[in-house]
Amino acid sequence: MAPRLLVATRKGLFTGVPEGAGWRFGPPAFLAEPVSAICADPRDGTLYAALRLGHFGTKLHRSSDGGVTWQEVAVPALPAEGEKPKALDMIWALVPGGAEEPGVLWAGTLPAALFRSADRGASWQLCQALWDLPERRDWVGGGYDDPGLHSIGVDPRDPRRIAIAISTGGVWLSADGGESWRIGGQGLRAEYMPPAQAFDPLVQDVHLLAACTAQPDVLWAQHHNGIFRSVDGGATFAEVTAAAPSRFGFAVAAHPADAATAWFVPAVKDECRVPVEGRLVVTRTSDGGETLQTLSAGLPEGPSYDLVYRHALAVDRSGRRLAMGSTTGNLWSSADGGETWRLLSAHMPPVAAVAFAD
């Protein structure tokens, strides 16, 4: 099957196929329905799309034919706390399990919880050990009222090793497939806290974690107030202090083979959340965070009000091809590692996530 580019938007899921130097998109699946998360499972080619339908609830669909047809499957359910169960707002992250675990999926949700499916989404089990952590009471909302679990990293060498990130609740690590958890993220810094609490791992608002596939102990974190890098699987992090338009942002993409390379999309933080000085750029490090290069060829020079969400920047398995979508419905791709960008569409609905499916 030809490679595809999946674009999850507020008004449906668009699928692109290569055409010349860009991509050609047909009519969307789930027209007019918000798609909050997508997953292209490399083990068997299955596609998954999570819908955030508000009053009508969260839905999950699965396709075994490249998106031609879709089948509704089960959704995770939060346990009751108090008189009635808390409603699931959305599925925020969907990732496949290990190569030797056919059918295993992981889902992160808002409110923050972790779920595992062993049957391609036909049923889900709550990760009870994470839910029962006493520290969960200290998690708070970042951009939402409730804390949310948006990042799940499964180690390709050992799928029992899992790293997650919560806004706002820090980085958590498991070495036994979710049966037990320990706090990671030592070295992360929260400048929005009083100085005595700035390095408390429980108060860290990590916006996204991304791991290098070939060297999964190397994790990049786009934090609320900085960029951080771990070389020990998320236990400790060092801050990237290289100059850039801003170290605030949501998206990060890690090169699949080169652990020293990653991409970010800077913005103005807190109440503003627009490109710095109205100019959309991508920053890239190729030396482990020692320096950051600003890339803008093909991107709007300004004024621009595009914000790129957590999952709306992706790199394919070659490490050369990238895609990026914005809150204003613009979609770009790059075929040269971000050196130059090509506008694919200026008329899409707001983009929540992008992903490559090979």
Image (tube, helix red, strand yellow):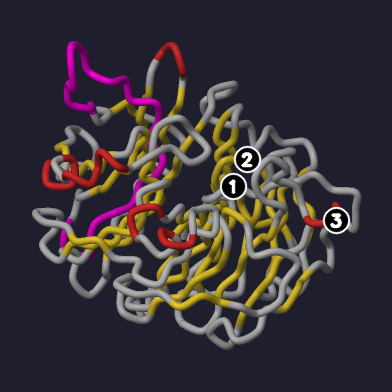
Task: Say which residue appears at 16% left-offset and 46% top-offset.
Answer: 133
Is mark 1 in CB contact (under 8 Å) with mark 2?
Answer: yes
Q: Quadrant of residue 80?
A: top left
Is mark 3 in CB contact (under 8 Å) with mark 1?
Answer: no
Tell me if 315 is positioned left or right of 99 in this view.
right
**Could you give the CA–CA distance between mark 1 and mark 2, rounded to whole angstroms?**
8 Å
Is residue 91 found inside the magenta-colored segment of the image? yes
Find disc 3 in the rendering and name its residue: 277
Is mark 3 in CB contact (under 8 Å) with mark 2?
Answer: no
Where residue 349 appears, x then y in whole percent?
A: 68, 32
Task: Say which residue appears at 46% left-offset and 35% top-offset.
Answer: 68
Tell me the kind of residue under disc 2.
Val
**Could you tell me what secondary structure mostly forms the magenta stretch?**
loop
Q: Is residue 104 above or below residue 228?
A: above
Find disc 1 in the rendering and name its residue: 309
Where residue 124 appears, x then y in whole percent?
A: 18, 35
Mark 1 closeness class: few <14, some 14–19, many ≥20 residues within 10 Å: many
**Could you give the CA–CA distance between mark 3 and mark 1, rounded to whole angstroms?**
18 Å
Task: Say which residue appears at 50% left-offset and 32% top-offset.
Answer: 35
What's the magenta region?
77-101
* Most foreground residue, 204 or 340: 204
